Image: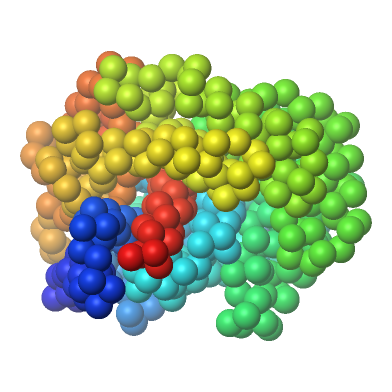
Amino acid sequence: MKLDFFIMSVTILPAILLALICEINAVPTQCSKPVKNKSDYAQVLGLSLLFYEAQRSGKLPKNNRILWRGDSALYDRGSNGEDLTGGYYDAGDFVKFGFTMAFTTTLLAWGAVKWPESYKAAGQLDEIRRTIKWSTDYFIKCHVSENVLYGQVGDFPIDHMFWGRPEELNTTRPTYKIDAEHPGSDLAGETAAALAASSIVFSSVDPEYSAKCLKHAKELYKFADVYRGLYHEAIRGAERYYESTDYGDELAWAAIWLFKATEDTKYFDDAVHHYQHFHLKERPNAFFYNKKVAGIQLLLAELTELSEYQNATRAFCDFSMLQQKRTPKGLLFIDKSGTLSHAANVAFLCLVAADSPEIGDSQKYRQFAKEQIDYMLGRAGRSYVIGYGNNPPKQPHHAASSCPNRPAPCGWQEFIKNTPNPHILYGALVSGPDEVDLFKDYRAEYIYTEVTLDYNAGFTSALAGLLQLQLNTLENC
């Protein structure tokens, strides 16, 4: 019942609200198209946050809306007994990867800081704060001392021996950390960025919690900067799945977000130093957890208004629009793993860049971003967002949603069934089609049907940016 009411509210209420606004302003011909688009973007924005709720680990709150989920992994502990419960499961499995969880949190916080009006208009402002706080509470737990950070809970090979509900996990869950003797500048830096960006989100609504996030962000950045190293050399299990090829971008990324949170010029100077020292000037071709240069260039362009950084951001967006490979139906194609996520992340950055006209052609950047996100929502013939639009995916590679209602058993027989998942994983963006727009909606074909925390991150923030464009249009109705 709770979920049905939520779906109704995010689907119907925005459309009613906008219809009334347009009627009052008496310009229906100008408002008719934005009404439809705003309803779509507002609805999917709410659904995307619902996906994160389905990924929660630990003790669930009383207002949990995912009725087929319950408390899980309540005995996650560090090597000295530290409480490591909470956080998010990474994908359709039950490992908690700190690196990608932190990147996800930074992007979600960036969108919330950039376009809070969108979340408010969609009725999702409290939800985005709760989504972010579920991560930051966990990061604070994992940061057990100044130079010690737990970066992974669960072992991937062990975890993948189990297919079922997280509430019924029957595998061991080892934990892994970085410290001064086994550093991870990338992991510590990304976690510092997430906490610094999140501190801005909470600065006006919960100053005490904001200060707590910022304290941990500062300590983690110092840890990352003083003790240099790649985190997967300390946490070997991450090398195969979420390897980091460098840590210079994370140091610069963390320093920029600390400057934005504190306005302390020390952090700005550090960011510029890292940018120069680690040779981050080259034009990137993607933006994701392992390549943050495009985001760094954009933030420096906004903060400094210097042509060096503006030109770099312009080069990235222009390359993405005009030269990057596309599928026949127009989707940006960077990599088959997370096809849609890569396109959504670029769309998000170019939407942010469009708010600075001196960087490039704002209208073209916005149109490009809209085309990419609309592809995901169904413009090319089908939706790639579970539970939304025309012919959405029905067999995501996601163990929990593949299980029938309890007390019915769940195991590998559910994995191999060629039937829709019994529970709809609302709002999850799947990995997506291949380079010729082919998509296989089959649970075992994870290259198409995988869902992860970071797949939804840039997508969520891009939806907020597109919704903001519609709100701006309404102001002129």
Q: Is residue 181 left or right of residue 445?
A: right
Q: How many marks?
A: 0
Q: Nearer the viewer, residue 407 or 194?
A: 194
Give the vertical position of 35 relative to 421 (above or below). Answer: below
Q: Is residue 26 left or right of residue 458?
A: left
> x and y percent of residue 70 in the render?
30, 68
Quadrant of the rendered structure where residue 298 is?
top right
Q: How is the image coloured?
A: rainbow
Q: Nearer the viewer, residue 463 or 51?
A: 463
Q: Residue furthest left?
A: 419
> x and y percent of residue 202 in the render?
60, 74
Q: Is residue 19 visible?
A: yes
> x and y percent of residue 236 in the render?
63, 34
Q: Quadrant of the N terminus?
A: bottom left
Q: Is residue 460 visible?
A: no
> x and y percent of residue 365 in the render?
49, 37
Q: Quadrant of the C terminus?
A: bottom left
At 89% from the left edge and 58% from the top edge, which residue is drawn? 265
Q: Nearer the viewer, residue 186 or 294?
A: 294
Q: Nearer the viewer, residue 385 or 228?
A: 385
At 63% from the left edge and 57% from the top edge, which residue is drawn? 194
At 55% from the left edge and 44% from the top edge, which residue is drawn? 354
Give the vertical position of 438 relative to 383 (above or below). Answer: above
Quadrant of the rendered structure where residue 417 is?
top left
At 37% from the left edge and 36% from the top edge, which residue is drawn? 372
Q: Is residue 370 left or right of residue 82?
A: left
